[in-house]
Amino acid sequence: MRVFLTGASSGIGEALARHYAAAGATLGLAARRRDRLHELAAELPGTHASYALDVADATALQDAAADFVARCGCPDVVIANAGVSVGTLADDAADLPALRRVFETNVMGMAQTFQPFIAAMKARGSGRLVGIASVAGIRGLPGAGAYCASKAATIAYLEALRGELRGSGIRVVTIAPGYIATPMTAVNRYPMPFLMPADAAARRFARAIERGVSYTVIPWQMGVVAKLLRLLPDPLFDAIFARAGRKPRGLDL
């Protein structure tokens, strides 16, 4: 199996890299942190390609995809996992660059990760395009407008892509994690129900990817929460979450 994975240097990405390498896959590992990326590639069993890049850079992703296909062949699975999260406030002009950065990474980065591989997958007639969304995309949470909106956009984008690629042999898989123990969630200053270790999450993600499910929430308990949130009337939702804890602002993206 060949797997191309973004956001590979830490958190969910690192856990997925370790899971697939242990299963004998050949990996294309992409992330911004060059040193950590090369360290990870050296730690994994097997021989893997690593690409130090920012998923906001479409040209860098096209170059990495071309190199991986030339060296290893068309991937069986492409996982657009790279993502950033930061608290933002709508009335603060200083937060507008953060909003733009979150969308460039979480939304454009996903599209730019998939695009270079789709033609080869279509020609072969098989493959998996996997987008890591979030339950935060179900409803907008105060103080997290950038992240919630970006994840809502990824869910809608993946849904549209699923229909677009129907009949091509390519399966589009949307995974919406709840709270996973990663550096991204470590800064949260509020309770995180059903918090799951990254390695356990990676195993569940891999099973969902293998099955080719169209959409899943992991852990399942957060799927129940997400369904309940959808059913809450707006006035009740607004009253409850206006007082909820908020993600810190001003993190380095």
Image (tube, rainbow, N blue to C red):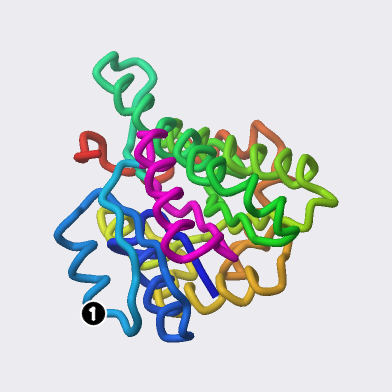
Q: Is residue 189 visible?
A: no
Neighbour class for label 1 at 10 Å: few (<14), some, many (≥20)? few
Magenta-colored stretch includes residue 103:
no
- Please provide the residue range marked out in magenta: 55-83
Q: Residue furthest left?
A: 35
The percent position of residue 233, horizontal first and vertical second, equals 71, 37
Magenta-colored stretch includes residue 74:
yes
Task: Identify the secondary structure beneath mark 1.
Answer: helix
Q: Residue furthest right?
A: 167
Q: Is residue 61 left or right of residue 118?
A: left
The percent position of residue 231, horizontal first and vertical second, equals 74, 46
Q: Is residue 111 left or right of residue 84?
A: right
Q: Is residue 215 above or below residue 92?
A: below
Q: Which residue is mark 1?
A: 43
The percent position of residue 202, horizontal first and vertical second, equals 48, 73
Q: Is residue 195 above or below residue 250?
A: below
Q: Is residue 117 left or right of residue 121?
A: left
Q: Residue furthest front?
A: 70
| Towards the viewer: 144 or 100 | 100
| Towards the viewer: 232 or 36 | 36
Residue at 54% from the left image edge and 36% from the top image edge: 140
Residue at 52% from the left image edge and 54% from the top image edge: 132
Residue at 59% from the left image edge and 40% from the top image edge: 139
Q: Is residue 205 visible?
A: yes
Residue at 55% from the left image edge and 75% from the top image edge: 1
Location of residue 106 by image quarter: top left
| Towards the viewer: 134 or 62 | 62
Q: Amino acid at mark 1?
A: Glu
